[in-house]
Image: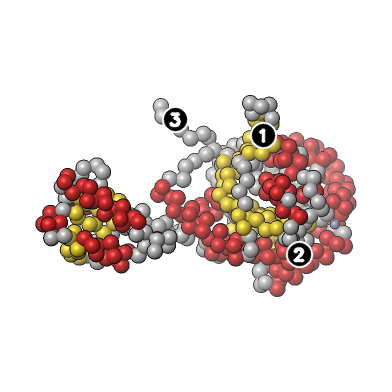
Amino acid sequence: MAIQAPKGTYDVLPGRSGVWQAVERVMRESAALSGFREVRTPVFEHTELFQRGVGDTTDVVQKEMYTFTDKGGRSVTLKPEGTAGAVRAMLEAGMHGGPMPVKMYYINTPIFRYEAPQKGRMREHHQFGVEVFGAPLPTCDAEVIALALRVIGALGVKDWDLRINSIGCPECRAEYHKALRAFLEPRLDKLCGTCVQRFGKNPLRILDCKVEPCQAELVDAPAVLDSLCDGCREHFEGLKAALDALGIPYVVDARIVRGLDYYTRTVFEVVPSGGGPTITGGGRYDGLVEQLDGPRLAGFGFGMGMERLITLLEEKGGAPEAPRALDVCVAPLGEGDRLDALRLTEELRGAGIKADMDHVGRSLKAQFRYADKAGATLVVVVGGDEAGRGGVRLRDFAARDEAEVSRGEVVGEIRRRVGGLAFSE
Ligand SMILES: [Zn+2]
Ligand SMILES: [Zn+2]
């Protein structure tokens, strides 16, 4: 039997990659408008980076990482999220010593999670994300949330709900943990095994549990928002004022804590209005850079699963149109015309026109059929009486006409009809 793709992975085939490219273009342009530039980091890092950066008590680190020992005996891990690598790269390059803030985005970054594959949750998926370092004020949070919404809106998703929450700083969270533990202690025997473990190390994570009996126990749990210190409360009020100033609607949802340990203060999620999986989520991580041996430096960012967004677009029929594979087919009339046809095909490509020719040895009729299937609107026939007169025959499917054009003018004529790619003159 032929070899198949590993479980939880898939291929973006040529018929669909155009949609990906169109989505990527929207993301890149939106990020650039907000002053972000791209960062590219390795697909694997030292395991320690994620243990310290993502957090030992998270599901990601405890259960879902693709970790292995390489031939040199080092433990390495395939990226389970995008932020820790970006922080590591910034610190290693000394960018934190330069002007603040540092704004970076990553796109099409492969993310690996070892979990049971199901609809929309793959073992390898791809993320678009942005990170801002050194901007502690809540207007930064609002601006980055606005960027996420601009991307989603530009891709045609109009019905979304923005949910925001504050999970405080280490100081006020310690207070909250006390209140939450006091609430959960008498209910411990009803919680799942994972939550019982979390109870000791990081009870906030229990709010994140998707298991039904745990959800039921949490209905009357105290909210983090009620335990915020003055600084965190002020910051959260600042975020709400900034979102109001931008006219961005939101709901405060005390149950949003996000799955990763590094978040402080603002956390947010954007979900489709009618329900469904989260489109994007993120928040503030003011302690992360320090946790990775850097200076005390504020951070804010979000990650956007590209598969989820593209699936959502395709379901709603809003996916950007994929570019046509081909503008023109060059058809040699006889075997003796093949090299002339090859030269003309390359000339067209050099002029920025998507061109192809027959390398199969098809009849002229079959070449026309192929051109139609490939979506080409033009066919140039090379050879015959026209060749004797220094010309070629040009058929235009879209305009439903056919004409003899001189060989010297055919490239210009085709360009006039189909346009050209941006990089050609
Ligand atoms: Zn606080
Ligand atoms: Zn649970």
Check disc 2 and report its element: helix, strand or loop: helix
- 37 and 136: which is toward the camera: 37
Residue 176 seen from this side: no
Q: Locate the C terminus by quadrant.
A: bottom left
Is there a contact, CB below 8 Å, between mark 1 and mark 3?
no
Q: CA distance from mark 2 to mark 1?
A: 36 Å
Give the amino acid at mark 1: Val
Circle nearer the N terminus (2, 1): 1
Label 3 Cα neighbours within 10 Å, binned few <14 / some 14-19 / many ≥20: few
Badge 3 is on which residue?
Answer: 3
Q: Is residue 231 left or right of residue 250?
A: right
Q: Are marks 3 and 2 in contact (CB under 8 Å)?
A: no
Q: Which residue is mark 2?
A: 138
Cα gap from disc 3 to disc 2, whole angstroms: 51 Å
Q: What residue type is disc 2 on?
A: Pro
Q: Quadrant of the N terminus?
A: top left
Query: What is the x, y in percent for residue 208?
Result: 72, 47
The residue drawn where x is 43% and y is 45% is: 13
Q: Which residue is mark 1?
A: 76
What is the secondary structure assignment of the residue under circle 3? loop
Q: Position of residue 125 (x, y in %)?
A: 56, 44
